[in-house]
Amino acid sequence: MKPIYRCGVCGAFTEEPWHCGKPAALLMTSEQRVRLSKLMSAILRHIPHEAGLELDPGGWVEVEELARAIRERWWRRDLYRWVTRQHVIAVALLDPKGRFQLSDNNRRIRAAYGHSVKLELGYEPLSENELPEVLYHGTIMERLNSIIHEGLKPMRRLMVHLAARPQEAIEAARRHGSRVVLLRIDPRCLAEMAVPVYRASHVMYLAPHVPLECIKSVEKVSSETAPCHE
């Protein structure tokens, strides 16, 4: 990830060191951004209690409260003394995968997907006309036998995650092993089998499960295939 800057003219957060024709102020380094983004994801998806936070039924928490918890109550808080409300908002707004959602006034924040804690996210199922032509799911070879017999299940998550582009699916799978397999999912097959599909971000969709019949192809991914960050 790139560093994040803040424009002194318009106040916008940006990944570019120049904005509005003038140098922008560095808000956080690339290393700080990655570290904070990972921690925000972990807290909002899985372990809010470890930061002394309680999410509301929809997964929302006050941005100021999250920043304070990271800065003052997280067990490695010595690494995050610099975190303010503005850092949390900047990470959320510029996340390339839409991992976070902010309320209209940037007062509250939640993870858009990836939860293991039970919540009511309030997403509406997509109509058949709203479904993309194809979705992707990345996994590793060691899990393929189970998928062939049972289809895709959420495992430790609340939902199966389906990516709009293959590179996101491949990148997610590589966190679990090197022998990556890419599955092509037919969303219209899901609709025909009455499996709801939800849109969580511009690159991520959710489904409660994916029957084997809706997995249209299985492709082994070369170890040289690098995910693209657009």
Image (cartoon, rainbow, N blue to C red):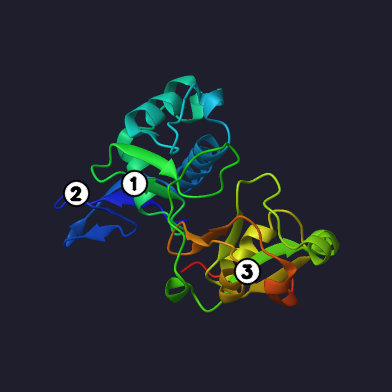
Which mark, residue 90?
A: 1
| Residue to which mark 2 is pinned | 11
Q: Nearer the viewer, residue 25 or 194?
A: 194
Q: Is residue 67 above or below residue 215?
A: above
- Which residue of the protein is positioned furthest toward the left in this rendering? 9
In x, y percent, where is residue 135?
57, 71
Disc 3 secondary structure class: loop
Disc 1 secondary structure class: helix
Q: Amino acid at mark 3?
A: Met
In x, y percent, where is residue 2?
43, 56
Disc 2 secondary structure class: loop
Q: Amino acid at mark 1?
A: Ala
Residues at badges 1 and 3 in contact (C-beta under 8 Å)? no
Q: Amino acid at mark 2?
A: Gly
Q: Earlier in the sequence, mark 2 or mark 1?
A: 2
Using the rendered image of the protein, determine whether residue 85 is visible from the camera's viewpoint: yes
Is 221 positioned to the left or the right of 190 in the image?
A: right
Q: Earlier in the sequence, mark 3 or mark 2?
A: 2
Is 100 positioned to the left or the right of 183 in the image?
A: left
| Residue to which mark 3 is pinned | 193
Closer to viewer: mark 3 or mark 2? 3
The residue at 49%/75% (across/down) is 132
Between the residue at mark 1 and the residue at mark 3, the CA separation in whole angstroms equals: 40 Å
Q: Nearer the viewer, residue 166 or 12?
A: 166
